[in-house]
Amino acid sequence: MDARMQELWDHHEIRQLLAVYCHGCDRMDEVEMASTYAADSWDDHGPRKMEGRQFSIDTVEEASRTTTVVSHMLGQSLIRLEGDEAGVETYFIATLMYPPKDGVETLNQLGGRYVDRLVRENGQWRIKHRICVREWSASQPVAGDFLGKAGFVQTQRGHVDVSYAALGMAHSGNPWLGEASAI
């Protein structure tokens, strides 16, 4: 493949990897999320610093217990390729909704950057080392939901979310916890 075409293809695959990571996290699919990490990976997410695949399991487990919504919005990525390795910086906004406490829901947001070292393993790009950089964060009570009854399809976690059918995917459950396939 021409070097410029290979570079374009690598950029596409890396952006796809970042989107798959967020989809897995947002849909509470720890298997999908863990699949984005290389063997012997590391993730530094502020208070949670650990091997990447274990980070996926722990993050999804905690979020499924403590939040009602997790949603990532990815911004621009700066990608520098070095053969089968890459340096990547990607801006993001993560939004988390927490169930009512004393009758009030809470909305937390984090704006920051994923600063990643990626490696190509078995022909696939994977996260080898991630640092989650905090640019800003905010927490606020939710006073109301102006579109709560407007007829939108509501987000759901796991295989029942409409994205799984549209993407032709299956939520595979957590094999590390001995779960069977959800579909």
Image: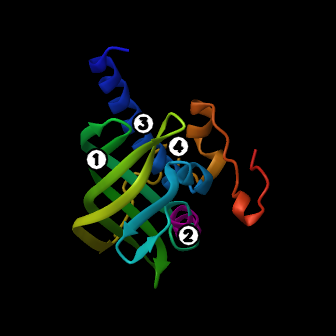
Name which residue type carries label 4: Val
Count of number-bearing discs: 4
Name which residue type carries label 1: Gly
Left or right position of 180 against 75: right
Question: Relative to the observer, which residue lies in front, 181 or 46?
Answer: 46
Secondary structure beneath dot 4 equals loop
Q: Do tag 3 and tag 4 residues touch (Cβ < 8 Å)?
A: no
Q: Nearer the viewer, mark 1 or mark 2?
A: 1
Residue at x-position 43% and y-position 51%: 127
* Image coordinates for residue 120, horizontal then vertical, percent: 45, 40
Name which residue type carries label 2: Asp
Question: Relative to the observer, which residue lies in front, 76 or 14?
Answer: 14
Mark with earlier residue (4, 1):
1
Name which residue type carries label 3: Gln
Mark with earlier residue (3, 4):
3
Whether residue 155 is visible here, answered yes or no, is: no
Mark with earlier residue (1, 3):
3
- Give the residue number, with chain letter if any, for mark 1: 87
- Give the residue number, with chain letter if any, for mark 4: 153
Residue at x-position 63% and y-position 31%: 168
> Is residue 19 a member of the stretch shown in magenta?
no
